Structure formats: structure tokens, C-alpha cells
Image (cartoon, rainbow, N blue to C red):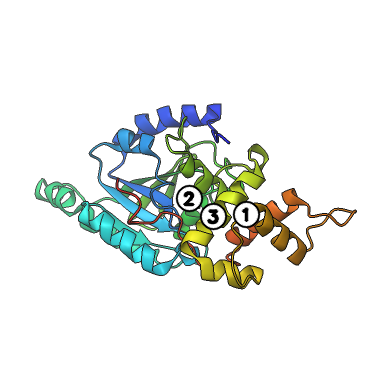
Amino acid sequence: MTIQWFPGHMAKARREVTEKLKLVDIVFELVDARIPVSSANPMLQEIIQQKPRLILLNKSDTADPELTRQWISRFSEEGTKALAINSQAGRGLNEIVRAAEELLKEKRDRRKAKGLKPRAIRAMIIGIPNVGKSTLINRLAKKNIAKTGNTPGVTRGQQWIKVGKDLELLDTPGILWPKFEDQKIGYKLALTGAIKDSLLNMQDIAVFALRFLESHYPGNMKKRYQLKEIPEDIVDVFDHIGKLRGCLTSGGEVDYEKTAETVIMDVRAQKLGNITFDMPDEINE
């Protein structure tokens, strides 16, 4: 299965982000902590260029905590500051302004030396759809300003939002890129909810999820689905899970589509534990 999703409003958003970049001091790039590389839009890297950047690993409560620590360390080694946050619960948000101030210290010192009055940091929030940008903005602003939703593509325009006296945020729509060079990235994005389910073959996504779990989190998979051993044949895995979870047709046969949806929802709801799908030792760039 080939996964692509690049609605017209995203092409427009790319142009708008490029135009507005000169108005901000720093870029906050929000990524999904479960897929910190796969959810980082390479097209945005080209747009940002030399602008200071702070990576925010959102939904960190759903990711493997040890791997999140490894990713933050790796980003640091590459010269990029990264923080683990949970915008839904408000965890880690107090560190964002402090980290931005550190990254912009030289620029702010130069303004002060010129006799210019200090002003609020102007930041642009970017990221792929459904990564939690609007939730983060509402948490930082302490009121519901940005529209939120649990489906990708909710935010369509741009808006400036004041966060106290120290920070002004420019919200932007979530932007995916036209072509996934590695289809595994498409599967990971689909599995974590960045692409609308209506565009997906759910059985293909579930097969990817189960094979990944078998390789990296077999204990979690066995516990959730009451398996002593994981069958080699994926059909046998589907049959077992379908019967266990009651995913059956009116004739008593296993409903593979319903079984696939059950597996995907289990992953998203952390029924299989905290899982990271981007493994530091498997991703070289």
C-alpha cells in the first residue's frame, strides 16, 4: 500500500509559513514522541534553514521513556535543543520559554546593547497534522484560543496568540509532505493518527503494527493478546486476536477489518504499553 496525503490547503500553508518566517525569532517544531523523526517534516527543515529551532517531543506520555531520553540526547549531539512534553496534561510546558530564552540569549543581548527595549519572544509553531499544536497553544495561553480536534487537518489558517508577556505564538496548519520516500514512515504516521483513517487500508497498517511489536515489544504483544508464542503466519495472529476480542461476522468467522481496527486502536490507546516506533539504532539520519 502506498500512503500519500497532501491536500491543497497544505500547499498554501507551506507558502504562508515561508512568508511569515521572517517575522519570528524562533521555530517550535512539534513532533510526536513515538515517531520523533518520522513525524518531522523534511520539507519544513528546508523552509526553516538557519532560524533557531526548539524540538518539542509531544505526547511523551505515550512513548517509550528510555527511547525518548535517547532521542533528546541524540538531538542535543546534533546541535538541536529538544524537550519532552505532554501538552494534553500540561507537563514540561514551563521549560519551553526558558529553553527559548537560552537559544535566543545572544540575539536578545545584542538588542539590549543597542538600547532597544526587550520584547516578547515571537515563535512559530510548526508540525504535522494531529501532533497537538492547538492543544499546546491553548495550554500555554491558558484559554481555548486555537481550535482542536482528534482528526488531522483541523487548523487551516494562521493566527498570533499572546502567552503572557514573554511569548507570542504564530500557529500554523499541520503540513505533511507530498511523497514519503520510505513507506515505513507512511505506516508510522498512519498508525499514530497523522493521516485520516478513511484514506487507509487498516489491515495493512495493523500488519505493520503487529510485525513491529513482534520485533521490538514481543512481551507487550503476548500480554495484551494472551499469546504464549507469536505465530509466524500473520493470518494466525489475526485469527487469534479476532476470536479473543470478539471481532466476528454474523456467521462466526473472524472479521479481519474489525480485527485490524481493534489492533490500531489498542496501539493508539496505549493498551500495548508505551511504544516508540522510531528506533534510534535503526534511523541513521
Quadrant (top left/top right/bottom left/bottom right) for the N terminus: top right
Location of residue 9 with respect to 53 vertically, above or below:
above
Q: CA distance from mark 1 to mark 2?
A: 40 Å
Q: Secondary structure at mark 2?
A: helix
The residue located at (10%, 45%) in the rendering is 114
Q: Are marks 3 and 1 in contact (CB under 8 Å)?
A: no
Q: Secondary structure at mark 1?
A: loop
The residue located at (18%, 51%) in the rendering is 108
Q: Position of residue 185 (x, y in %)?
A: 46, 43
Q: Position of residue 173 (x, y in %)?
A: 49, 39
The residue located at (63%, 61%) in the rendering is 266
Q: Amino acid at mark 3?
A: Arg
Q: Earlier in the sequence, mark 3 or mark 1?
A: 3
Q: Position of residue 137 (x, y in %)?
A: 47, 53
Q: Residues within 10 Å of mark 3 (few under 14, many from 20)?
A: some
**Between marks 3 and 1 in the image, the one whose residue lies nearer the viewer:** 1
Q: Residues within 10 Å of mark 1 (few under 14, many from 20)?
A: few
The residue located at (39%, 66%) in the rendering is 92
Location of residue 241 with respect to 190 vertically, above or below:
below
Q: Secondary structure at mark 3?
A: helix
Q: In the image, 269: left or right of 159?
A: right
Query: What residue does disc 1 label?
Result: 233
Q: CA distance from mark 3 to mark 1?
A: 11 Å
Quadrant (top left/top right/bottom left/bottom right) for the C terminus: top left
Q: Earlier in the sequence, mark 1 or mark 2?
A: 2
Q: CA distance from mark 2 to mark 3?
A: 30 Å
| Quadrant hosting residue 17 | top left
Q: Amino acid at mark 1?
A: Asp
Query: What residue does disc 3 label?
Result: 211
Query: What residue does disc 2 label?
Result: 133
- Front residue of 20 and 224: 224
